[in-house]
Image (cartoon, rainbow, N blue to C red):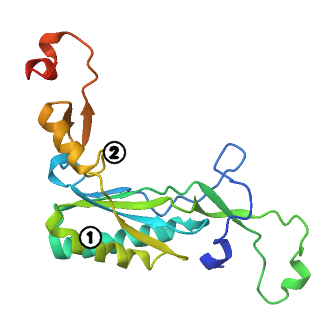
Amino acid sequence: MGRRPARCYRYQKNKPYIKSRYCRGVPESKIRIYDVGAKKAPVDLFPFVAHLVCDEKQQISSEALEAARVAINKYLTKHIGKDAYHIKMRAHPYHVLRANKMLSCAGADRLSSGMRHSYGKPIGVAARVDIGQILLSVRAKDSHEKYVIEAIRRGKFKFAGRQKILKSLNWGFTKYPRQTYVQMRKSGELSTEGNIVKVHNRRGPLEKSALYQSGQE
């Protein structure tokens, strides 16, 4: 018996059902890599970000998430090179899908128990997503904007329902709008730490303070 079509599990009908000591024997999620591309690239390198935002309350299988990741990665690698972008998958599949397995061979009607003991066995996992939830984000240089949008558009076909592609006003994966980010970087209030940004918290000795040294305080 193969996998059921994802349309059987598209809607959030039941309570969240996660892997636990009571729910054992859950198959591994198909998506294992959530960050692809130049994930260690410094914050300043990739200012442009686009998000794929879900427009429906639904469940997305781990197979669909992996298929979208592969499609986006393949398109971007081909057109802008493997070190010119960073894909971050933002939806994680924790919800366990069940199926009441039925026999479909000859003479199955004698053996099958119908709806007796019909609580199903785990067959896969899915992510429960809401309206307005970000499914994935891609950061890159401003010059590669059209390639990022097209890549996300291609990845969108792997999901059921409706999604929207949004261009972010923020700098990279930070929470700061572009102008604010540039000002705070110039003033020394923000400092880059790999692919994240650190805010100067104004604590500690003055001789170690970047803001104090630059005359800000």
Please give the name of the residue rendered at 55% of the width and 76% of the height, measured from the top-left corner: 161
Whole-percent x, y for residue 24 in the image: 67, 50
> In this view, which residue lies farthest toward the bottom?
106
Please give the name of the residue rendered at 55% of the width and 67% of the height, measured from the top-left corner: 61
**Which sits in the foreground, 38 or 188?**
188
Please give the name of the residue rendered at 17% of the width and 76% of the height, measured from the top-left corner: 79
**Screen quadrant of the C terminus:** top left
Element assignment for label 2: loop
First of labels 1, 2 by sequence position: 1
Whole-percent x, y for residue 58 in the image: 61, 67
* Residue type indicated by callout 1: Val
Please give the name of the residue rendered at 19% of the width and 76% of the height, measured from the top-left corner: 78
Q: Residue 175, which numbered label?
A: 2
87 lies above or below 211: below
Q: Is residue 50 left or right of residue 22?
A: left
Q: Which residue is mark 1?
A: 148
In space, the residues marked 1 and 2 are separated at their CA atoms by 20 Å
* Residue type indicated by callout 2: Lys
Q: Is residue 42 visible?
A: no
Whole-percent x, y for residue 212 in the image: 13, 17
Quadrant of residue 191 within the rendered picture: top left
Graded by Cα atoms within 10 Å as few (under 14), some (14 to 19) or many (20 or more), the crowding at tag 1 reads many
Graded by Cα atoms within 10 Å as few (under 14), some (14 to 19) or many (20 or more), the crowding at tag 2 reads few
